[in-house]
Image (spheres, helix red, strand yellow):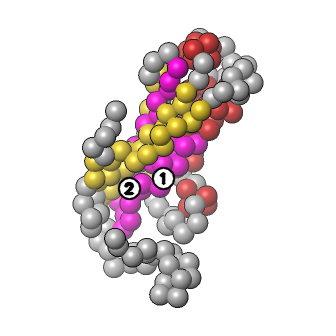
């Protein structure tokens, strides 16, 4: 196993020095699943929430969150994001699937930005629907794919 890069030889936290890494185009795709009661899904689809269109508010929250990742996650680099796309769809009677795709041209990747976008979109759905569904579950927040960088591309084999 590789050595952890966010700690120095004395165990102190540090931000990784990426200054010697080449600039390249990088993308990452992450997902989150939200499980709700069928009645809640119907209310979402029928836009019956007083707070607004749940899926559109969640999409906007995810996009906004991707741009603030370095403020939320210690030791993340501030990146000039070139694109963030958050797709949200009902994936069955009790499930909403969120897929966040983030891109940049930089010295380090955007996996954390994609994961943050998917997570915050899921939390927004929770927040907007909690008054009618106390059993909401956010599950399976994970990186699906990344492209670019020194270590090359990665694609999760167990995508469902």
Residue density around tag 1, few if under 14, some if 14–19, many if 20 or more, within 10 Å? many
Residue 31 is a magenta residue: no
Q: Position of residue 69 (x, y in %)?
A: 55, 56
Marks 1 & 2, CB-CB < 8 Å contact: yes
State which region is magenta.
94-120
Quarter where residue 22 is shown: bottom left
Distance between the Cα atoms at labels 1 and 2? 10 Å
Quarter where residue 24 is shown: bottom left
Q: Residue at x 62, y 38 (%)?
A: 123
Asked whether 98 or 148 is in front, the reply is 98
Q: Is residue 158 left or right of residue 45?
A: left
Decide: is 19 above or below 122: below
Q: Position of residue 138 (x, y in %)?
A: 57, 36
Q: Residue at x 33, y 56 (%)?
A: 26
Label 1: which residue? 113
Q: Is residue 133 left or right of residue 158?
A: right
């Amino acid at each position: 196993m590789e050595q952890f890069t966010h700690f120095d030889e004395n165990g102190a936290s540090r931000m990784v020095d990426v200054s010697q890494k080449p600039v390249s185009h990088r993308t990452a795709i992450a997902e989150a699943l939200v499980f709700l009661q069928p009645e809640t899904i119907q209310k979402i689809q029928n836009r019956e929430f007083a707070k607004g269109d749940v899926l559109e508010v969640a999409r906007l929250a995810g996009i906004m969150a991707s741009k603030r990742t370095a403020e939320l996650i210690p030791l993340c680099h501030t990146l000039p994001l070139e694109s963030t796309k958050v797709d949200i769809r009902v994936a069955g009677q009790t499930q909403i699937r969120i897929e966040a795709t983030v891109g940049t041209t930089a010295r380090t990747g955007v996996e954390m930005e994609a994961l943050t976008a998917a997570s915050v979109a899921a939390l927004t759905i929770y927040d907007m629907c909690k008054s009618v569904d106390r059993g909401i579950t956010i599950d399976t927040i994970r990186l699906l794919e990344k492209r670019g960088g020194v270590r090359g591309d990665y694609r999760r084999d167990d995508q469902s």
